[in-house]
Amino acid sequence: MNAEGCHESSLAELALADEELGSAESLLQARFERVSLTRSYFAVFHAARARLYASGFEPRSHAGVHHLFNLHFVKTERFEPGASRLLARLQKYREEADYSNAFVVDPDGAREELEAARAFVETVRGQMKSRPGRPRSQ
């Protein structure tokens, strides 16, 4: 993908992250905590992809997003290690929420994870705004 494609993809991913945050909020208000938690994961996932695309990286899978994000943003201290833990924790919760009949989420826990996801998305947005111009190609 060329630099223009990476830039457009990063903006599209950030829009998806915002959509997922809105969905998570609506689901939480409707008392669907389990499903809200899955949407919080996807908000963080899409924001991480946005940040990767903005820097010219092209992740091809969920595992690729985790790996590239950790390698290029956490290990280089552009993000705190807590960002990596958030992504991993929410992915685990999403998988359990989708595949385990016994997975239970309390409203306060779902709200905390949603707020953590919202903060992550805003951090990504801030980093992308502070680095104007086209992403580098790889």
Image (cartoon, rainbow, N blue to C red):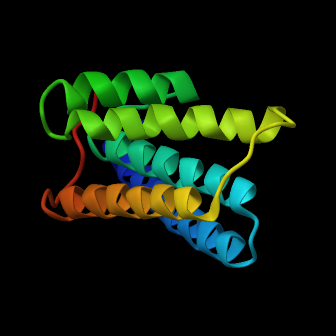
Q: Residue at x 28, y 38 (%)?
A: 82
Q: Is residue 57 left or right of residue 66?
A: left
Count the marks: how many? 0
Residue 62 drawn at (x, y percent): 56, 29
Q: Residue at x 63, y 53 (%)?
A: 37
Q: Which image quadrant is residue 65 in?
A: top left
Q: Residue at x 23, y 27 (%)?
A: 72
Q: Residue at x 14, y 56 (%)?
A: 131
Residue 19 drawn at (x, y percent): 58, 68
Quarter holding the N terminus is: top left
Q: Is residue 87 left or right of residue 78?
A: right
Up-down: is 118 above or below 137? below
Q: Which image quadrant is residue 39 in?
A: bottom right
Quarter holding the C terminus is: top left
Query: Looking at this view, is 26 or 109 the one in front?
Result: 109
Up-down: is 101 above or below 7? above
- Is residue 136 at least partly visible in the picture? yes
Up-down: is 128 above or below 53? below
Residue 15 drawn at (x, y percent): 50, 66
Residue 111 drawn at (x, y percent): 52, 65
Q: Is residue 5 left or right of residue 38?
A: left
Query: Looking at this view, is 101 or 94 the one in front?
Result: 101
- Is residue 56 at least partly visible in the picture? no
Query: Looking at this view, is 80 or 137 the one in front?
Result: 80
Q: Is residue 66 left or right of residue 105?
A: left
Q: Which image quadrant is residue 25 in?
A: bottom right
Up-down: is 98 above or below 29? above
